[in-house]
Amino acid sequence: GAGVSQTPSNKVTEKGKYVELRCDPISGHTALYWYRQSLGQGPEFLIYFQGTGAADDSGLPNDRFFAVRPEGSVSTLKIQRTERGDSAVYLCASSLTGAQGTGELFFGEGSRLTVL
Amino acid sequence: AQKITQTQPGMFVQEKEAVTLDCTYDTSDPSYGLFWYKQPSSGEMIFLIYQGSYDQQNATEGRYSLNFQKARKSANLVISASQLGDSAMYFCAMREFGARFGAGTRLTVKP
């Protein structure tokens, strides 16, 4: 696709439920990033993939959060036993190169998660 | 661990004037990249400018320039000739591995 695609754009769920958020990066981009953004705050880093592997998952808040990128393109962020505090916009970004490369991060429009 | 600090929660500037948004960072890695992004109320993240740690000259992109002071670990964004459409949240970010963002500065341009 032309840009980073995230689905669903909106997700409302009940506390305790399982949620999957999908990110389809720009074709050919090897680096993929997940962020969580609450209203009025900066994007909070969650995880960074280089290819299929998670190069840095130090931002995942706890073991309820997990992300995969099995074929080095599409990524899924999985949240188990959702809590009201998980409500936020989840942003995905991709870039042509990772690490210190000059490639800018291209962002998707985000998935807004609301946990009731 | 990476750390990005933006100390100005909000800034006001008069239309057509210049404004500087502050950003400091902390890293022990000699190789890193610094970015600035704009996020208007619509929520999209718009890339503005990039500075590599080894770049000798400050980056410029149109009305945006990055005042990079490596020894002080600062990467301030300068917006010249402010326009009403510049009103938005501005985020500084640093990339070593995973790119991390600061808390942001809300810029309001007054007519």
Image (tube, rainbow, N blue to C red):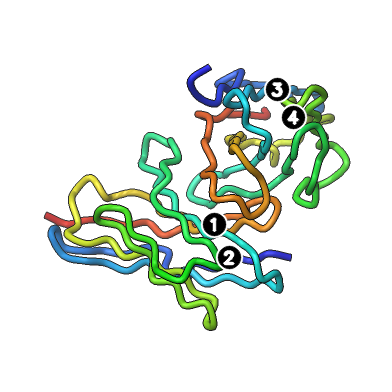
Q: Quadrant of the C terminus of chain A?
A: top right
Mark 4 belongs to which subunit? Answer: A
Question: Which of the labelled discs sits on residue A74, or is there none?
Answer: 3
In the depicted structure, whether residue A7 falls above or below residue B84:
above
Disc 1 + disc 2, Cβ < 8 Å? yes
**Which residue is the site of mark 2?**
B4
Whether labels 3 and 4 share one chain: yes
The residue under label 1 is which amino acid type?
A: Ala
Q: Residue furthest bottom?
A: B71
Q: Residue at x 63, y 42 (%)?
A: A97
Identify which residue, A83 or A56, lies in the foreground. Answer: A56
Where residue B15 appears, as percent x and y from the top left, is: 14, 58
> Identity of the amino acid at label 4?
Leu
Q: Could you classify mark 3 by the number of other residues whose Cα lies within 10 Å: few (under 14), some (14-19), or many (20 or more)?
A: some
Q: Are marks 2 and 4 in contact (CB under 8 Å)?
A: no
A23 to A97, vertically: above or below: above
Name the residue that disc number 4 marks. A77
Determine whether, in the image, residue B98 is placed left or right of residue B46: right
Label 1 marks which chain's residue? B
Task: Quadrant for residue B46, please give it.
Answer: top left
| Residue A86, position as x, y percentages in the image | 70, 38
Q: Is residue A41 left or right of residue A86?
A: left
Please, is residue B75 above or below residue A108 in the view? below
Q: CA distance from mark 3 to mark 1?
A: 24 Å
Compute the Cα span from label 1 to label 2. 7 Å
Residue contact at pointers 3 and 1, CB within 8 angstroms: no
Chain letter of disc 2?
B
Chain letter of the residue beneath label 3 in the structure image: A
Q: Are marks 3 and 1 on the same chain?
A: no
